[in-house]
Image: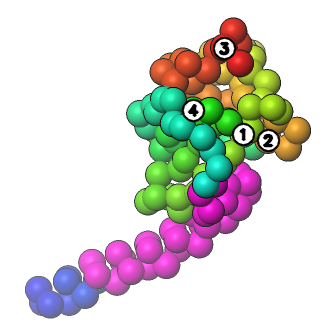
Amino acid sequence: MNLSVFHLILGVIVLMVIIAWPAALLLRKMAGLSKAVLKDTGKCLAESSWGSARLNGVGANNVVKIRRFEKGVQLQLIPLFGGGHLWLPNDELQIEKAEGKRFFEKTHVVLKTSKDHVKVYGNLAESVGLTPKVI
């Protein structure tokens, strides 16, 4: 009997991995993230802890890290959820602070380029110096 319970638990875990991995890859693609890490970013000026953001419409709660470089901003998704990086170059980057429009929506910082729209929640953007005054 114990052997069948073990096989059941193992089967559930395998099934979860089979379903979760393609879902994570799909969400990474929908958010516009790439696996390639840019080499010509300049020196890293600041790095945040993990926090929440909405990357091109895809929500990511407590799984996004921001790195500010000399030539732009990189957002990284935690590897467990498919990894991936989003590069926002300084020459296109616009930073706005926005108040939540709905009752439960938080105040956030919006990072925009010509092709990307990112909402960063909490103090994630401020922790690396991304405020409307800086860039």
SS assignment for the magenta stretch, majority: helix
Tell me what residue is drawn at x 44 percent, y 72 percent.
16
Q: Which mark is residue 68?
A: 4
Residue type indicated by callout 4: Arg
Pick whichever of labels 3 and 4 is earlier in the sequence: 4
Tell me what residue is drawn at x 62 percent, y 32 percent.
70
Residue contact at pointers 4 and 2, CB within 8 angstroms: no
Q: Which is nearer the eye, 60 or 127?
A: 127
Residue contact at pointers 1 and 2, CB within 8 angstroms: yes
In percent of width and height, residue 87 lies at 68, 45
Q: Is 132 rendered above or below residue 22?
A: above
Q: Within the magenta stretch, is there residue 36?
A: yes
Tag 2 residue: 116
Q: Is 82 rendered above or below residue 113?
A: below
Label 4: element kind: strand
Q: CA distance from mark 1 to mark 2?
A: 8 Å
Residue type indicated by callout 3: Val
Q: Nearer the viewer, mark 3 or mark 2?
A: 3
Q: Which residues are magenta?
A: 9-38
Tag 1 residue: 88
Residue type indicated by callout 1: Leu
Kindly indicate the quadrant of the structure image that contains residue 43: top right
